[in-house]
Image (cartoon, helix red, strand yellow):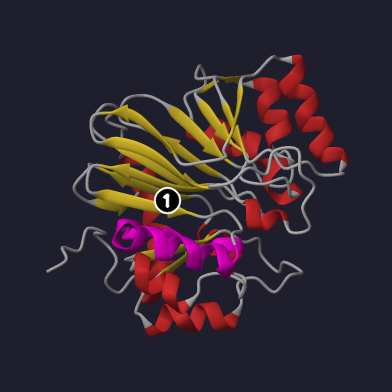
Amino acid sequence: MTIKRFRQAIGLAAAVAALSALLTAVLFVSVSARGQETEVIFLDIGQGDSVLIKTRYGQNILIDGGRDNRVLDRLGRNLAFFDRTLDMVIATHPDSDHIAGLVPVLERYDVGLVLDPGVVHDSSVFSALQEVITRKQIPVRYIESRQTYELGEGVVLDVLFPDQSFVGRDIEDNNAASIIVKFSDGDIDFILTGDAPQAVEDELAARYGDYLDAEVLKAGHHGSNTSSSDLFLDTVTPEVAVIQVGADNRYGHPNFRVLKRLEARHIPVLRNDELGDIRMVSDGEFVELR
Ligand SMILES: [Zn+2]
């Protein structure tokens, strides 16, 4: 029997509006117990992706930065004012809704390491990102095969994809080079797939199978129909899905077919356009919204 580890998962979809009000209230009384809890915060940066992980051991990891400066305000709200360190920044792929916000972030924060698929892209934003990395001499690791980062006992960042070298290549579909990670805090697992399309999801499902089982899935590509296939959802079997979308975005994200696939599996959907920042707090055994 699978233990349900997402505390408010039952009835969540129906109670999103009420929950939103509740979250605001709880925020003011909760004091972060650093050292016992890990936070994963899906930042409300409009149409784009940005996820901040604050581990129980004090590391800060930022996965993508959205399409503009908005990420700075969100980081300011979610990190202590004196905390200017990001131990790791992951640029999943060079589309502007993922990396544009990383440019001002790398300017202002002390960044220990950047993970990047190594794809080259002809855009001013891509050039600006390379420029700040070079100027500030920020270490970069290109992901060409699986890399596992042990962040402390029970806390692991497992970088599953790319499993091949895209370094120096200008590819047609940047999404297909998206860095995909499984982040684990004890028994609580998150699968974050950037904008990876179904072909990559299939490859992952075939290779990793049950290892992809996770409590939380960030639905790929902002809930686009190119991702979150039946096979992938049945492999990950998430208790909740997060969709990072901006209100009234011109892409029609999330796609209704994806919402139907989630609904058919009774997987509640949490959306940034409806909830603002989505903060999940894990004690290693259970995870909840806070
Ligand atoms: Zn995107």
Q: Which residue is mark 1?
A: 24
Residue 206 belongs to magenta span: yes
Q: What kind of residue is marked 1?
A: Thr
Give the quadrant of residue 47. bottom right
Residue 289 in the image: above or below residue 15: above
Residue reaching furthest left? 1
Q: Nearer the viewer, residue 226 or 102?
A: 226
Q: Give the quadrant of the N terminus.
A: bottom left
Give the quadrant of residue 210. bottom left
Q: Residue at x 34, y 37 (%)?
A: 156
Q: Residue at x 62, y 72 (%)?
A: 226
Q: Is residue 240 left or right of residue 49?
A: left
Q: Nearer the viewer, residue 83 or 158?
A: 158
Q: Nearer the viewer, residue 10 or 163?
A: 163
Tag 1, which secondary structure? Answer: helix
Residue 113 in the image: above or below residue 248: above
Residue reaching furthest front? 164
Q: Nearer the viewer, residue 277 or 68?
A: 68
For the stretch drawn in magenta, the main secondary structure is helix
| Magenta stretch, residue numbers | 197-221
